[in-house]
Image (tube, rainbow, N blue to C red):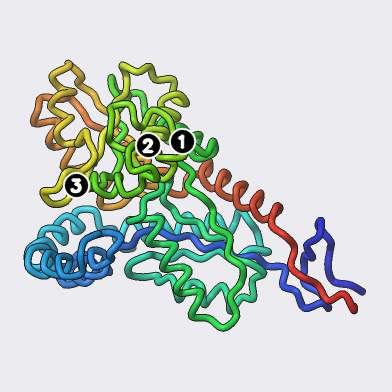
Amino acid sequence: MLARVAVGQRQIGGGSDGVSARRGVLLVNLGSPDAPTPRAVRRYLREFLGDPRVLDMSALGRSLLLNLVILPFRPRRSAAAYEKVWTPEGSPLIVNGLALRDALRKSLGDDWVVELAMRYGVPAIDSAIARLADADVERITVVPLFPQYASASTGSALEAVYCAAAERWNVPPLDVLPSFYTEPGFIAALAAVARELPEEQLPDHVLISFHGLPERQIRKSDRSGAHCLASESCCDAIGPANRFCYRAQCTATARALAKALGLGSEHWTLSFQSRLGRTPWIQPYTDELLPRLRERGFRRLAVLCPSFVADCLETLEEIGIRAREQWLALGGEELVLVPCVNAHPAWVDALAGWIRDRDASAPAPPRDASR
């Protein structure tokens, strides 16, 4: 008796044609040090900031900046920050990523193999691809966990995935999920998390804070060379010139989220955090915006960080601790960090549905016509 059930053109449950029915999912996020120690942070920063997509300058300039300016001083400061948010289970980014992996495995079911990988550090991309290949998956759906595209995040992660896959003799087909900055399920999940704030934490203003990027990287993404950052309205709409523009995609996310939450234009503000060095980064800067919001009379602030799908150092420490301390010192009453989507059921359901839809539209693998 045939031990398979046909679904469209795909064979489920295996069979005599030898075609695997299992599909793989590779979740990819940025990465984290192994421990909140200067040594571990130095090792992580060397790999992270040694990436030419992150520090996009000449090899010599990158080496001098990294070895003479950053690595001698930053690891100790960053380790102290990591120490404040480290959990008994480890790095918050890894812990939240593993929770998403496990929830997605449960949602997708036994016909799917789901692995988590980090662009820098562990779990490594090459090891995750090896596990998927060993599971004999039919294809791998790659999910860069970066809602908005940037060469320093999505681009770097995909480059690493392709390089790791190229090292294998047999490479399963790879299907990459695109940036999801206004994907309805993602926006709905962000809104669902925000609506769970208890009544005593409801704000009188919402700040939507994204990770920043150097202005030069925004301009490099401009296909026309004349659109991005050329006017105050350059991010109002996304077209051929700026379809890879991180700032434009962040603006689109913020507007979609504000609409989903029913916020009028006077009730929310967009900003960018996490800048590094002295070169101009995209504005307005979160830390410089807080005093202006306080001057406008706002007392209770809620901050959402929708460039991250998992809470990490940049959300928990930079916003949840440092920005909150700054806000209270300015005379504000409260600043509440709204959690990322993490492994929230609404996000798991949305992501699982998106993956299934992509798989359903993918071509079926070749079959042995002689059987």
Q: Quadrant of the C terminus?
A: bottom right
Looking at the image, residue 36 lies above or below residue 19: above
- Which residue is tagged 1? 239
Residue that appears at 83% across and 68% down: 4
- Local secondary structure at mark 3: loop
Three-letter code, disc 1 = Gly
Residue that appears at 56% across and 62% down: 25
Looking at the image, residue 24 lies above or below residue 344: below
Rendering quarter of residue 118: bottom left
First-in-chain label (2 vs 1): 1
Looking at the image, residue 356 lies above or below residue 320: below
- Which residue is tagged 3? 275
First-in-chain label (1 vs 3): 1
First-in-chain label (2 vs 3): 2
Label ID, residue 248: 2
The foreground one among 205 and 139 is 139
Which marked residue is nearer to the observer: mark 1 or mark 3? Answer: 1
Mark 1 to mark 3 CA distance (whole Å): 27 Å
